[in-house]
């Protein structure tokens, strides 16, 4: 029954939402048909084995904690390693490199599964990500195993096409169930909105504050926050700044603009969602707020509407629930793991 409801919901999301635009222009997916087929198979067959933690631990970051707790309660778990597609290596975020190396060495010596793939069918949660190391155990963990981290990840701590980032979690209570649908009319008062954390000082933020086309607020009350999202055409995010409200922005039809000075490949669910058609990645090293204004005003109304609608549709998959729902953030993380379950089986060899 749960599988049927999930597929019905997904089928609804994949249907064209407007006669004015083609399904392709509205769809937030790289391939909706592939997602539908794979998601059904994942629900039926995907199994994960969790190693017993060597010491008690918890994840202090909300997305990581929600993922781990949801996984523990999910039907994806198996107590039989023989039927597992992937193996989860649990450890505390503050584990030292020496202790982490010892943990991997113990897995290698006490279990047969790590050596079959040199860790390629294993995954772990590290909110900040892990760096490269000369230690052989940590090097295999870094290069081969799937890392799940918080978005955004420090440069060098994330390997595209292998690693996964968790969608941000915004603790502010917002009535997302009351957000407008993709076809609702909208009127904006501001070109860009920046919800400033009050900590990140920059010349660019000061320029935004002095420009009437931009709205800059600190720690808004929830009602003012919603109004600001509704009245703004674009929502501005400083990469490695406060991105917790990005999903809220998308749900309310405010197109995300990520201000970053280099290409990024750690946006959540990049294997599934067409971020290039839902958000703008811009560098404003020169020109500041005025240059950004030129870029945003250069987006055609047709392109903007398509980005807004695709982002609103995609936001359904980026929301964390205390009790997981079909195709929510937890299930989409599982889907990213499902896509990575095919590991290369290395010839087994003895290690000293």
Image: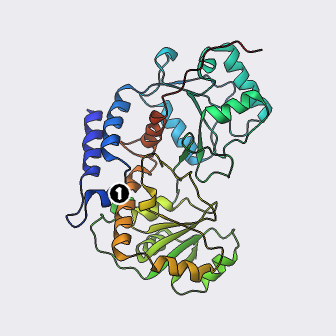
Q: Local crowd at mark 1 within 10 Å, few (<14), some, or many (≥20)?
A: many
Name the quarter where the C terminus is drawn. Answer: top right
Residue of label 1: 313
Residue at position x 27%, y 40% from top? 7
Tell me where residue 280 appears, x and y as whole percent. 49, 66
Residue sitting at the far front: 347
Q: Is residue 111 left or right of residue 184?
A: right
Relative to 70, say whether 155 is above or below.
below
Seen from the viewer's position, the closer of residues 309 and 186 is 309
Relative to 160, say whether 235 is above or below.
below
Q: Is residue 167 left or right of residue 26?
A: right
Seen from the viewer's position, the closer of residues 57 and 333 is 333
Tell me where residue 78 appears, x and y as whole percent. 47, 21
Residue sitting at the far left: 19
Camera sees residue 72: yes
Relative to 115, say whether 61 is above or below.
below
Seen from the viewer's position, the closer of residues 164 and 244 is 164
Its colouring scheme is: rainbow
Residue at position x 70%, y 15% from top? 109
Camera sees residue 57: no
Q: Which SS class for mark 1?
A: helix
Residue at position x 61%, y 86% from top? 210
Name the quarter where the N terminus is drawn. Answer: top left
Relative to 195, say whether 106 is above or below.
above
Tell me where residue 347 appears, x and y as whole percent. 60, 16
How many marks the image carries: the answer is 1
Residue at position x 46%, y 48% from top? 320
Tell me where residue 246 appears, x and y as whole percent. 50, 61
Splitting the image into 4 quarters, where does residue 302 fall? bottom left
Splitting the image into 4 quarters, where does residue 120 fall? top right
């Amino acid at each position: 029954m749960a599988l049927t409801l999930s597929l019905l919901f997904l089928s609804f999301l994949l249907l064209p939402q407007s006669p004015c635009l083609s399904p392709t222009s509205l769809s937030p997916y790289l391939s909706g048909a592939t997602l539908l087929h794979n998601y059904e198979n994942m629900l039926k067959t995907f199994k994960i084995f969790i190693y017993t933690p060597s010491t008690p631990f918890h994840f202090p970051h909300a997305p990581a904690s929600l993922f781990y707790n949801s996984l523990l309660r999910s039907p994806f778990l198996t107590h039989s390693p023989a039927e597992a597609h992937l193996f989860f290596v649990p450890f505390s975020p503050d584990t030292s490199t020496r202790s982490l190396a010892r943990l991997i060495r113990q897995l290698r010596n006490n279990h047969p599964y790590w050596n079959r793939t040199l860790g390629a069918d294993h995954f772990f949660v590290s909110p900040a990500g892990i760096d490269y190391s000369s230690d052989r155990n940590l090097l295999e963990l870094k290069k081969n195993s799937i890392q799940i981290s918080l978005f955004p990840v420090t440069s060098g701590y994330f390997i595209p096409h292998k690693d996964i980032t968790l969608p941000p979690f915004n603790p502010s209570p917002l009535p997302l169930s009351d957000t407008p649908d993709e076809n609702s009319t909208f009127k904006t008062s501001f070109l860009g909105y920046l919800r400033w954390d009050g900590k990140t000082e920059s010349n660019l933020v000061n320029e935004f504050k002095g420009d009437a086309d931009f709205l800059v607020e600190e720690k808004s009350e929830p009602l003012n926050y919603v109004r600001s999202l509704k009245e703004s055409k674009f929502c501005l995010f400083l990469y490695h700044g406060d991105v917790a409200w990005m999903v809220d922005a998308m749900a309310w039809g405010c197109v995300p603009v990520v201000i970053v000075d280099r290409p990024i490949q750690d946006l959540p669910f990049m294997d599934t969602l067409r971020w290039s058609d839902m958000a703008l990645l811009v560098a404003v090293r020169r020109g500041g707020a005025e240059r950004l204004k030129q870029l945003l005003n250069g987006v055609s109304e047709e392109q903007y509407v398509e980005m807004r609608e695709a982002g609103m549709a995609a936001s359904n998959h980026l929301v964390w629930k205390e009790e997981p729902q079909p195709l929510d953030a937890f299930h989409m993380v599982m889907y990213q793991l499902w896509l990575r379950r095919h590991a290369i089986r290395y010839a087994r060899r003895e290690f000293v």
